[in-house]
Amino acid sequence: MVYILDTELVKRTSIYFALQKIFGIGKKNSTFFSKKLGFSINLKVKQLSNEQIFELLNYIEKSKFLINDKLKKYQSFVFKKLILIKAYRGLRRLKGLPVRGQRTHTNSKTSKIYKIKH
């Protein structure tokens, strides 16, 4: 198994899908990283050499993207900030209700039952 940024990448998958398993890297960033380093999107993880893995790891770390723990900390900070300033979004999220104006009379009964705990 190959580990990049504390995430296990399955060897039989292509690099395009394997990079998407890292928290904070989606489809767009996955293609960006693979094209920038000269990898084919269809390249399997098991075909990568140790030098290529090291090069990929360095490039991801040097990029300005928030990935893994940094992104999780940032999201929790934003959520706590919304609660602290008592914004509508923060209070709705704290109560476990829909945030973006959805109907609550007949819908979102499950979100009322299972409140989100952050």
Image (cartoon, helix red, strand yellow):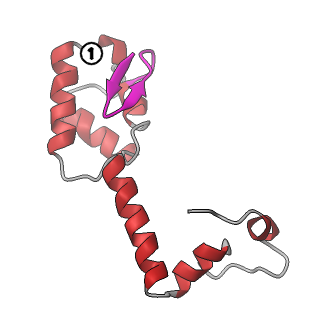
Out of 3 and 20, give the one closest to the viewer.
Answer: 3
Part of the protein shown in magenta: 1-14
Answer above or below: position of 106 versus 68.
Answer: below
Q: Residue at x 83, y 82 (%)?
A: 105
Q: Quadrant of residue 4?
A: top left
Out of 11 and 39, give the one closest to the viewer.
Answer: 11
Q: Residue at x 68, y 75 (%)?
A: 97
Q: Horizontally, is 82 left or right of 98 in the view?
A: left
Answer above or below: position of 5 versus 53.
Answer: below
Q: Position of residue 41 (x, y in %)?
A: 33, 28
What residue type is disc 1 on? Leu
Q: Quadrant of the C terminus?
A: bottom right
Q: Quadrant of the N terminus?
A: top left
Q: Position of residue 108 (x, y in %)?
A: 77, 70
Q: Horizontally, is 53 left or right of 80 in the view?
A: left
Q: Quadrant of residue 2?
A: top left
In the rendered structure, does residue 13 fall within the stretch colored magenta?
A: yes
Q: Position of residue 44 (x, y in %)?
A: 37, 17
Q: Residue at x 39, y 31 (%)?
A: 7
In the rendered structure, does residue 27 fall within the stretch colored magenta?
A: no
SS at circle 1: loop
Q: Which residue is mark 1?
A: 48
- Residue 36 makes an appearance in the image: yes
